[in-house]
Amino acid sequence: MKFATLALIGITMLAGCSRRGDARLIGTWQSDADKTIAQMKTTRTITEGPEAVLRKYYGHIKKTFTPTTYTMDANGAAGRNEVETVPYTIVHRDGDSITIKYRKNNKDLETKILFDGSDGFWQAGDDTDKGEYYKRIN
């Protein structure tokens, strides 16, 4: 009986751990404007004027992931300076990506993060088909 109880507790703890954090994601990431805009240019023509506008949006945001929280610092992107920290859980993971679930503005959201080596990832935007590249800064 003791063994069965301990085994059940151990399995429950391991199951909970599998939803927390992913070593590939933990750290601070900076929006990569060059790579994001280069990706956009593969699907449409972007001239100097519109590219300058895009650079007001991309390249500023910092995202920091701990095993349990996700912090987004707008860092002046398009005039925004908010910092927001929310808890998250991993709802799917494989060799190339993870999908996280978090709550923002009273809505449950999921976003897929596709890793690009160990120092970069692509993240789709919230409720949009747009996305952004990020590079590891620590």
Image: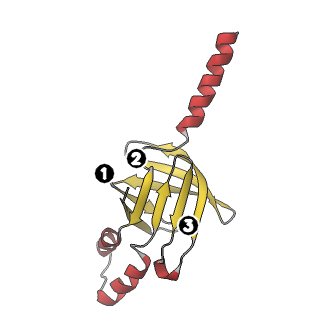
Distance in Å between CA atoms under marks 1 and 2: 9 Å
Residue 82, compared with residue 45, is above or below; it is above
Q: Position of residue 2 (x, y in %)?
A: 69, 11
Which residue: 59% across, 65% down?
84
Instruction: Identify the residue under disc 1.
Output: 117
- Residue lying at the far top of the rendered structure: 1
Per the rendering, the mark at residue 127 is 3
Which residue: 64% across, 11% down?
3
**Contact (CB < 8 A) between labels 3 and 1?**
no
Q: Amino acid at mark 3?
A: Asp
Q: Position of residue 130 (x, y in %)?
A: 45, 69
Q: Nearer the viewer, residue 84 or 58?
A: 84
Q: Earlier in the sequence, mark 3 or mark 1?
A: 1
Distance in Å between CA atoms under marks 2 and 3: 24 Å
- Residue lying at the far bottom of the rendered structure: 49
Instruction: Identify the residue under disc 2.
Output: 24
Q: Amino acid at mark 2?
A: Arg
In the rendered view, does 102 fall on the left or right side of 66? right
Please tell me how many numbered marks the rendered image carries.
3
Distance in Å between CA atoms under marks 3 and 1: 25 Å
Q: Amino acid at mark 1?
A: Gly
Per the rendering, the mark at residue 89 is none
Q: Quadrant of residue 7?
A: top right
**Contact (CB < 8 A) between labels 1 and 2?**
no
